[in-house]
Image (cartoon, grey):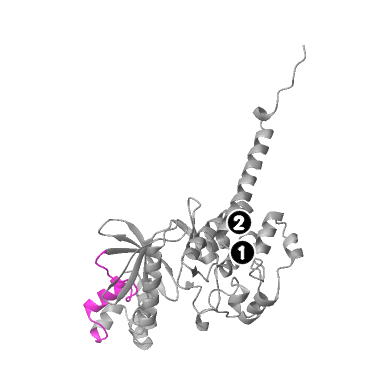
Amino acid sequence: MTNDQPVALLALLVHRGMLSPGVAQQALRSSDARGWLVANGHATAAQWQDWVETEAGTRPRLSRYELGALLGEGGQARVFAAVDRQDHRTVALKVLLDELARDPVARARFVAESKLLIALASPNIVKGYRVAREGDTVFCAMELVDGESLQQALDRDGPFDEGKALDVVRQIAEALACLHDRGLVHRDVKPGNVLLDRGGRAVLIDLGFAATCADGDPSTTTVGTIHYIAPEQARGQQDLDVRADIYSLGATLFHLVTGSLPFSGRTSEEVLAKQVLESLSGERLRALGLSPQLHWFIEKMMAKEKEIRFQDPRTLAREIATVLARRKAEAERDASDASPRGKRPRRRWL
């Protein structure tokens, strides 16, 4: 163990309530944190070893899976790369946080989301393989996507070119169509919830907020990320349908091609008010230098009145595919005309 490791481990132990701050500070001041804790009765040698191996209980030991690197961590779960010892498949293992695993409601919601991922069959939705419980650990084995989120790509490289952004949106529209077929609304479509693999496949993740269109619980309607949610979602309406997801996908498209959010504000309340009351400025869109087709897609997807938006995601996907195919044909024609072989030979008169 390096000098930095006891510090990080002790900090985790304090954060998780397994040691008091005072005890951790005294252990750090000693030359041997482990030895001091054991000698003073704050831990046994076996307990210290367990803390080291499980990183203070944040890395579970599972009989079927060998855990690798931590891929991500949120308010509900940690995601690890892992290898299934039975079939040797590499997976992403989503592990529900301990405090939530002890909560029957949170546990049931996690299991329901996992079962939904297992049941869905779309190349553009992350695939679930298995949900299980071992001891106090509740987890879901999922497809490991070799790539990064759109948000990570934006943060690193800035805005996407139009063609790439439209292709991503087309693929996520196909994912939404799969959810729509089951009467489901995702309710949290955003760049952070879309992964892009190395082959260009876009994958929708995190169905934790997904609900049926008939879900009438007003406490569950205003969920999602405020910069992307539809006006009806911001108002807390109970009759959400897939058109709310189409709005969020339009806001995602706007972010992808401009590098900025459609609406911003100093507070969440200010952003929510703009989502409900303000329309996108046509002048602002034109000033960004977007193509007329892209301008039209954003305006139609993000219309305040849901009746004006695309009414189903498959129609949206088809229209984007048509635009992309036309652009590809025009680019190929231009390339052919510009090449020496593409030029017609001059006719020689004898």
| x 34%, y 57%: residue | 90
Is residue 60 covered in magenta?
yes
| x 37%, y 77%: residue | 108
> Neighbour class for label 1 at 10 Å: few (<14), some, many (≥20)?
many
Vertical arrangement, residue 47 with respect to residue 81, above or below: below
Q: Amino acid at mark 2?
A: Phe
Judging depth in this view, the residue of 77 and 296 nearest the camera is 296
Q: Is residue 144 visible?
A: yes
Residue at disc 2, secondary structure: loop
Residue at disc 1, secondary structure: helix
Q: Is residue 70 visible?
A: no
Residue 250: which disc? Answer: 1
Residue 160: which disc? Answer: 2
Residue 85 in which image quadrant: bottom left
Residue 21 x/y as whole percent: 38, 86
Q: Which residues are magenta?
A: 39-64
- Count all numbered tags in the image, as a single digit: 2
Q: Nearer the viewer, mark 1 or mark 2?
A: 1
Judging depth in this view, the residue of 182 and 344 nearest the camera is 182
